Image: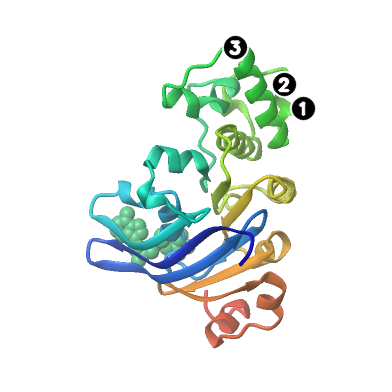
Amino acid sequence: MENTILKSVDFDAYFGENHVVKKVNIEIPKNNVVAVMGPSGCGKTTFLRCINRMHELIEGASTKGKMLLNNEDVYEMHPIFVRHKIGMVFQRPNPFPNLSIYDNVIAGYKLNGMKMNKADKDVIVEQSLQKAALWNEVKDSLHKKGTFLSGGQQQRLCIARAIAMEPEVLLLDEPTSALDPISTSSIEVLLQELKKNYTLIVVTHNMQQAARVSDKTAFFYLGELIEYDDTKNMFTNPQDKRTQNYITGRFS
Ligand SMILES: Nc1ncnc2c1ncn2[C@@H]1O[C@H](COP(=O)(O)OP(=O)(O)OP(=O)(O)O)[C@@H](O)[C@H]1O
């Protein structure tokens, strides 16, 4: 694929002896939203966490194969650099409870001991909140704690925090599953906006959401990537019986 930003080659992941991601080969095009779906326990989150090397933080966890970002193996880069380039947003909004909205946005810089003057910080905070479609709602309360925000606003704050590090790829693990329908819809709109500047990989259990937001969909089953195609094709003309069964609700 010409515009591939991320590519896995024969990628395996294990928890101890338990082989949970099996020989996954996938190419993710730049500025796309790719949905990752499949039944519970099929390795979606594990695969996502392998992309930015968070899997290896778990004791006994290991990987095999290649994960290439712009053709360079992320497993040969410094893990901190990898997590700058490949940001992550989790299922439950997790702003740092003791930090203000402002400090939450630049938390990644502080955690890594990267010093900046106030003017630069102000720019990063405003730009990141703008891109996360939260600026207008919080610009007058930047020094209040992030936990005062609604769930949907907190999730957008977490997106702003990830964007502040200027990643190329953003991994989102069921980013709306803890949110109400209105917040969910505002995050879905935001994803469409964000893909202009970033490449997004979104784990979702919600097939309607995958159909609404993604350009391509990957279907995982028992640790294997069974099918990967343009979302439209995947939902209208799945090639594998297991994908067909999943999208028609024969197993969840
Ligand atoms: N920390 C862990 N230690 C050991 N095994 C784990 C751990 N996390 C997940 N697993 C196992 O790895 C397999 C894949 O889990 P994973 O969370 O990646 O699946 P998933 O498709 O994201 O599931 P869900 O949709 O329920 O979130 C499962 O068998 C799970 O039990």
Q: Which of marks 3 and 2 precedes in the sequence?
A: 3
Q: What residue is disc 3 on?
A: 118
* Quarter of the N terminus within the rendering: bottom right
Mark 2–mark 1 CB contact (< 8 Å): yes
Left or right: residue 134 versus residue 29 is right
| Residue shown at 46% from the left, 57% from the top | 68
Cα gap from disc 2 to disc 1, whole angstroms: 6 Å
| Tag nearer the camera, 2 or 3 | 3
Q: Which is nearer the eye, 41 or 21?
A: 21
Dot 2 crowding, Cα within 10 Å, few <14, some 14–19, many 20+? some
In percent of width and height, residue 195 lies at 69, 50
- Which quadrant holds residue 2? bottom right
Residue 97 seen in render: no
Label disc, if present, on residue 139 of the rendered structure: 2
Identify whether 174 is placed above or below 153.
below
Secondary structure beneath dot 1 equals: helix
Q: What residue is disc 1 on?
A: 136
Dot 1 crowding, Cα within 10 Å, few <14, some 14–19, many 20+? few
Q: Which is nearer the eye, 227 or 242?
A: 227
In percent of width and height, residue 112 lies at 42, 27
| Residue shown at 56% from the left, 37% from the top | 162
Cα gap from disc 2 to disc 3, whole angstroms: 16 Å
Ligand 1 image-quadrant field: bottom left
Q: Which is nearer the eye, 93 or 68?
A: 68
Give the amino acid at mark 3. Answer: Lys
Cα gap from disc 1 to disc 3, whole angstroms: 21 Å
Give the amino acid at mark 2. Answer: Lys
Left or right: residue 184 versus residue 51 is right
Left or right: residue 198 versus residue 68 is right
Give the residue at the far top of this rendering: 118
